Image (cartoon, rainbow, N blue to C red):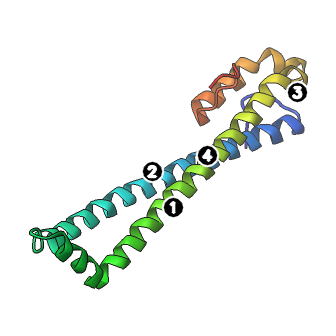
Amino acid sequence: MIFPIDLDEVTKVILQRIIAHKKEWSDMEKRMKWALILFLFSLILFGLYTYQTIFIPNHTSIQRMIGAIIRDERMLSFVAFVSSVGWLVSFYKKKSEKAEQDFHALRCEFIQKSSELLQEEAWKKRHLLFTWMKETYDIQLYHENK
């Protein structure tokens, strides 16, 4: 990776780790969103299936509806699939939150120690590095707040 200013190896490694953590966080966010879309889509299909096969033919009696639910072989599969996708959304949400915390902790640590990490020449040109990081990777290194 080529940075816009000369940096020592330690600083390069730290910045590369920050970039890798940002990518991991973005990937987890995308996976969580796709899992959520799949969950909502499958939930809608499950609702439509239940309405068409259980509610409409048996709308006169609750007992007939319950009996139809018990007799329907696909109902258990549908419930298992929707539950699995719901668990997947929860899993990716936790992974995404963990990746976000790791990214922000590393980013804040770099911000706090940047005066020590950046040597004299690099310190004078740090605005070029910070602007490049913001434009290229959407990583803000000026302030600790998100």
Dividing the image into 4 quarters, which one contains the N terminus?
Answer: top right
Checking the image for residue 117, the label placed there is 3
C-alpha span from label 1 to label 4 = 16 Å
How far across and how far down the image is residue 83, in percent? 44, 66
C-alpha span from label 3 to label 4 = 24 Å
Checking the image for residue 33, the label placed there is 2
Checking the image for residue 88, the label placed there is 1
Residue 143 seen in this snapshot? yes
Disc 3 or 4, which lies upstream in sequence?
4
Q: What residue do we see at 76% from left, 20% from top?
A: 126
Question: Tag 4: residue type?
Answer: Trp
Q: Where does label 4 land, which residue?
A: 25
C-alpha span from label 1 to label 2 = 11 Å
Q: Residue furthest top?
A: 124
In front of the other: label 1 or label 2?
1
Question: Tag 1: residue type?
Answer: Leu
Disc 4 or 2, which lies upstream in sequence?
4
Dividing the image into 4 quarters, which one contains the C terminus?
Answer: top right
Question: Tag 3: residue type?
Answer: Leu
Disc 1 or 4, which lies upstream in sequence?
4
Few, some or many residues within 10 Å of mark 3 (<14, 14–19, 20+): some
C-alpha span from label 4 to label 2 = 12 Å
Residue 27 seen in this snapshot? no
In front of the other: label 3 or label 2?
2
In front of the other: label 1 or label 3?
1
Few, some or many residues within 10 Å of mark 4 (<14, 14–19, 20+): many
Instruction: Report helix, strand or loop for mark 4.
Output: helix
Q: Are marks 1 and 4 in contact (CB under 8 Å)?
A: no
Image quarter of residue 9: top right
> 24 or 61: which is nearer to us?
61
Instruction: Report helix, strand or loop for mark 1.
Output: helix
In-image side of 123 versus 62 (left or right): right
